[in-house]
Image: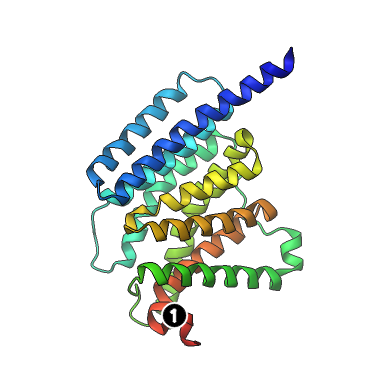
Amino acid sequence: MSAPTISGYLKDNVRLTLVPVFLIMLAELLLLAGKEYVSIWMHVGIVLLLAFATTFIHKREITMVFQALMLLSLLRLVNISMPVFFEKTLYIFVFTYAPLIIPIVIVLRAQDFRFSFRISEEMKRNRVLYSLIAVIVAIAIAEGEYAIIEPGYLIPDLSITSLLQLSIVMILFVGLVEELIFRYILQTRLEQVLGTWPALLTASLLFGVMHSGYGTIYEVLVTGLAGLAIGYLYVRTRSLYLITMIHGLTNVFLFGFIPHLGPGLGLI
């Protein structure tokens, strides 16, 4: 008698999880289709719906997933609505991602996360190997993205000062904030409901569609695959440090080295 009950309970949890996942994907696909106004209001509705739902659903594993998914819609809303304070485009990333630290901290505290940026003993013993993995994965993702969106450079040159500015913004703001949202919080909570590999796939799909703002389905596909690679490394290592470095370095190559040196970093 207990097996069907447990099975039904799990199915209900999966359904409750996948509904907002599909709504977020739909909102992002509308953005991809050029329906920005509709997409914005849909994300507003998703935030309100999830906030409302958490007051009535008393399954903690579901409310934690809902809180994580709310961060995605907040990320999109802040990204679209943030005014420009500086002429230097690089600083826009700071003002886009810094406000998200507040809701992230609230979710981390509400869900009793034990925030840790430490490096495991295994990574310390194999620091050269993991450093190579981080750089190789970052370059591969950056080259793939550059081939599609061909962004301009965010720094005027490759001087130490310019690279330091770019690295601070891309690692400590963009990389850390997005990895906290997509892998550290969302993927972890999805695992508790869907299981490890379905959670990895779902988080990667969401990571991909959340790049719909670039206006091309190819960027969505490439970043989805990038999310799959980074998410897999997170499953293997559980290292926020590693995935943050990979994400940050990807953007350093994408918006710094490759625009200045050309595809293949000038080696091809």
At 44% from the left edge and 48% from the top edge, which residue is drawn?
Answer: 101
- The answer to whether residue 81 is above or below residue 58 is below
At 59% from the left edge and 42% from the top edge, which residue is drawn?
Answer: 199
Q: Please indicate whether residue 195 sits to the left or right of residue 172 in the image.
A: right
- Badge 1 amino acid: Pro
Structural crowding at the residue carrying mark 1, measured as other residues with C-alpha within 10 Å and reported as few (<14), some (14–19) or many (≥20): some
Label 1 sits on a secondary structure element that is helix
- The answer to whether residue 189 is above or below residue 169 is above
Query: Residue 206's spot in the image, x, y percent?
Result: 47, 47
Query: Residue 128's spot in the image, x, y percent?
Result: 70, 73
Q: Please indicate whether residue 238 sits to the left or right of residue 179 in the image.
A: right
Q: Is residue 157 visible?
A: yes
Q: Quadrant of residue 22?
A: top left
Query: Residue 13's spot in the image, x, y percent?
Result: 57, 26
Q: Which residue is mark 1?
A: 263
Viewer-nearest residue: 266 or 215: 215
Query: Residue 123's spot in the image, x, y percent?
Result: 72, 63
At 39% from the left edge and 54% from the top edge, which residue is drawn?
Answer: 211
At 31% from the left edge and 57% from the top edge, which residue is drawn?
Answer: 215
Q: Quadrant of residue 6?
A: top right
Viewer-nearest residue: 14 or 185: 14
Q: Is residue 113 visible?
A: no
Q: Please indicate whether residue 4 sits to the left or right of residue 149 in the image.
A: right
